[in-house]
Amino acid sequence: MDEIDKQIIKIMLKDARTPQRRLAQKLNISPPAVSYRVNKLIGDVIKRLVLYVNPNFYGKYHGYASFSNLKDYEGEYIAKIRCIESENIYEIEGKNREDVKLKIDSMAQELGEPHMVYIPAQTPYNPSRFDLKLVSILKERPLVKPVEVAEELGVSSKTVRRHMRYMFGKNFFRLIPIVDLEKAGILMYAVFTKRVEIAEKFFYNTMIREISDDNAGIFVNVADNVDEINNTTMKFRKEFDPEASIMITSKYEFT
């Protein structure tokens, strides 16, 4: 692992679909060098790539809750993020907002009171049969090429590309690298705050994912070390939101 490898991982964490030519331009190295490095990282530091499907795609709702990690939750969840501050963050889905709340309440009976609960404003989608066929292929083969999908579904590659652009653009789909953070030598941390507009600007250069609405948001960032996280988050708390919650990730998984 060197600094270029770290930068590749950071870019892929933000958008794993970034074309290798664009990676090469950003890193000022040749496309073949990027290809070599990416292939070397996948299966080692990047354990695998998974397709995250936003529950809104299926007409459902989702929310987030953090609990003490003294006990692991054995029930259903979409994602689990282990944090070094003795807590786990879970992403939960439900038929509606009330169902998500009920599931989090049920988790609380087993894990204790949540430290954070966030159910963002959201608009469920009504997928077509074509959408469902598309997602089925992408979940099984996240790196499949549009032309291969087109052949399988009997449509033009232009149609597949258009649908994929829409789904990824609306954040219904997201290609996520599952990274061994210790091997990568980087850290991930999440900031939960009600100062959404300020946080979008403040964390712009380090942010890899944002889940937000008009009232609050979770901003996921990358850093090289704990000191960088401390300096950045202390500045944000001091200048903008003293009540912001900071959660440093040690490991994450998607079901």
Image (tube, rainbow, N blue to C red):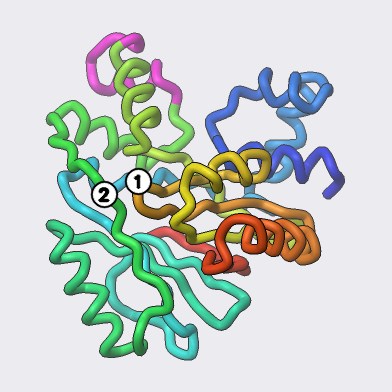
Q: Is residue 223 above or below residue 33?
A: below
Numbered disc 1: secondary structure: loop
At horizontal 40% and vertical 54% (from top left) the residue drawn is 216
Numbered disc 2: secondary structure: loop
Q: Residues within 10 Å of mark 1 (few under 14, many from 20)?
A: few
Give the side of residue 175 with respect to residue 131, left or right: right
Whole-percent x, y for residue 191 in the image: 54, 59
At horizontal 54% and vertical 42% (from top left) the residue drawn is 200
Whole-percent x, y for residue 231 in the image: 76, 61
Q: Residues within 10 Å of mark 2 (few under 14, many from 20)?
A: some
Q: Amino acid at mark 1?
A: Asp
Whole-percent x, y for residue 30 in the image: 81, 19
For the C terminus, which image quadrant?
bottom left
In the rendered structure, which disc, 1 or 2, sits on the residue that comes first in sequence? 2
Check whether the beta carbons of the residues at disc 1 and disc 2 lie within 8 A of each other. Answer: yes
Residue 208 visible somewhere in the drawing? yes
| Stretch of the chain drawn in magenta | 145-158
Which label was assigned to residue 214? Answer: 1
At horizontal 26% and vertical 74% (from top left) the residue drawn is 104
In front: 233, or 222?
233
Q: Amino acid at mark 2?
A: Ala
Q: Main secondary structure of the magenta part?
A: helix
Q: Which residue is mark 2?
A: 121
